[in-house]
Image (spheres, rainbow, N blue to C red):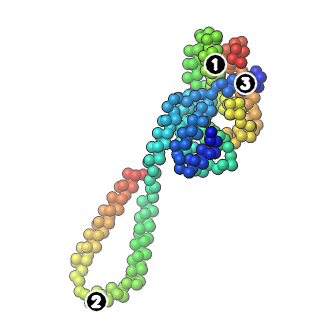
Amino acid sequence: MDTDFELIKKIKEGDRSVFRYLVERHKDVSLSLACSIVKDSGKAEDVLQEAFIKVFKKLDSFQFNAAFTTWLYRIVINTSYNAIKKDKNRYPFSQEAEEKLQNTADIPIDKLKAKDQKKYINLALEKLRPDEALVLRLFYLCELKISEITESTGFSISKIKVDLSRGRKNINFQLRKLLGTEIDNLL
Amino acid sequence: MKEEQLKYLIQKSTVATSDDFTDMLMQQLETIEEVKPVRIISFQKIMLIAIAGLLCISFVAYKYLAPFLSEFFGKVQISKTPIFAVCLLLCLLGVNYILLLQQSYRRLS
């Protein structure tokens, strides 16, 4: 399988259709990052489309001295923050998350365990502050080092450490609030 | 919650895009590639450059062609009225063309 750099080389040489493979490879993790900030999966998908278009347009200026993912995540994160800046009337925590929470509140946990584990974890992440959820995902999902997170987000190292620490506490709190002692079944 | 447990949970939280996400994106990119951006130059800039160019040409023509022209017009007797009429017509056509250009410039920008 071609590496990101090989795919980018092919695109730069004129084979634009290869961009599809690059998108397929990174779209889910990128969407998760956008969701951390935008807090709405529908809007996050729109933001991601916009971000990938920017990536495609700027690909010629991409230098191979940095990881493609760090560059991609930076564009996704900037586009997401711009999107929430435009949408000033949004709720601090998404209304969508509240609705989902109400819909799932009465479902027995044993049924949820198999089906909706992902949903519960995402609900807990949606309740976190955008910066905290983003840093948690960059650290644990994308497995970036703190220095790489700095490069992708523009946050200082101390801010990242604080957000990570708060994020860990808050997701634990949110999951316990949602699931009570049943949290152990998730693990 | 332990570090490894948290990592396990966060890795489970990956959000999947809709099935047609990539197709829609590639379609959008094709549309972008088809529509090449039109480079619009300021109308005032064009006018200034054109006037400066005309002045330069007039100056060069006056400097180098004047002796030949006076010699030519000294020999040939031409009535002034048709020359003025032609000049007036050319001026009107020029103004008309500039107005049309300005209109299309506004439409484009």
Residue named by callout 2: B74
Residue named by callout 1: A117
Task: Identify the image quadrant of residue A22.
Answer: top right
Task: Residue type at mark 2: give it.
Answer: Gly
Q: CA distance from mark 3 to mark 2?
A: 100 Å
Residue named by callout 3: B6
- Residue A68, how many percent across, how many down? 64, 43
Chain at numbered mark 3: B
Task: Identify the image quadrant of residue B63.
Answer: bottom left
Task: Residue type at mark 1: give it.
Answer: Gln
Query: In the displayed structure, would residue A114 be above or below residue B94?
Result: above
Determine the residue positioned at 57% across, 39% down: A21
Which of discs 3 and 2 lies nearer the camera? The answer is 3
Labels 3 and 2 touching (C-beta < 8 A)? no
Secondary structure under tag 2 reads helix
**Residue under disc 1 on the same chain as residue under disc 3:** no
Secondary structure under tag 1 reads helix
Chain at numbered mark 2: B
